[in-house]
Amino acid sequence: MNLEEISVMTPKKFAIKIETIVAKGGVRYMDAILDYCEKNQMEPDAIAPLISKPLKEKIEADARELNFLPKVATLPI
């Protein structure tokens, strides 16, 4: 990915790319983001502004599932 492509990347485009990686690779969201950074020779810090709220929520859900974050109480349905 060249500098021009990075400068026109929007959070929506980035989320679509990450969703595609997750769907094709069967990996978790954090792994998909790190894989994307590695393939495009980017630091993970550089993509922080591109992470949308829905993508953050999916990353957080993955982290809770892996016990990286404490579980949140949910109401029984």
Image (spheres, helix red, strand yellow):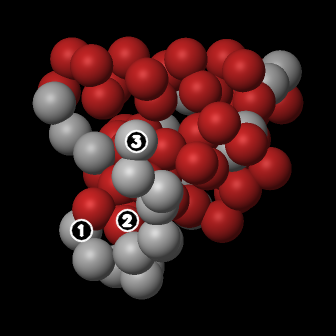
C-alpha span from label 2 to label 1: 5 Å
Q: Which residue is mark 1?
A: 66
Label 2 CA crowd tier, 10 Å (few <14, some 14–19, many 20+): some
What amino acid does circle 1 point to?
Answer: Leu
Q: Is residue 12 visible?
A: yes
| Secondary structure of residue under mark 1 | loop
Density class for disc 3 (Cα within 10 Å; few <14, some 14-19, many ≥20) is: few
Nearer to us in this view, 60 or 44: 60
Q: Which residue is mark 2?
A: 63
Q: Amino acid at mark 2?
A: Ala
Residue 4 position in % (x across, y down): 78, 23
Instruction: Say the numbered circle drawn on residue 39.
Output: none
The residue lying at 27 percent from left, 19 percent from top is 23
- Helix, strand or loop at label 2? It is helix
Name the one closer to the observer, 13 or 61.
Answer: 61
Picture coordinates of residue 11, whole percent (x, y): 75, 30
- For image coordinates 21% across by 17% down, the residue present is 24
- Identify the residue at image location x=59%, y=27%: 15
Residue corresponding to mark 3: 77
**Which numbered mark, 2 or 3, is in the foreground of this view?**
3
Name the residue nearer the viewer: 65 or 34. 65
The quarter in which the C terminus is drawn is top left
Q: Percent from the top left, x then y, of residue 47?
A: 67, 50
Q: Is residue 69 above or below residue 14?
A: below
Amino acid bearing label 3 = Ile
For the residues labelled 2 and 1, say whether their Cβ atoms are less than 8 Å apart.
Answer: yes
Q: Residues within 10 Å of mark 1 (few under 14, many from 20)?
A: few
Q: Is residue 35 visible?
A: no
From mark 2 to mark 3, how far is it between C-alphas?
23 Å
N-term-proximal mark, 2 vs 3? 2
- Image quadrant in which you'd find residue 39: top left
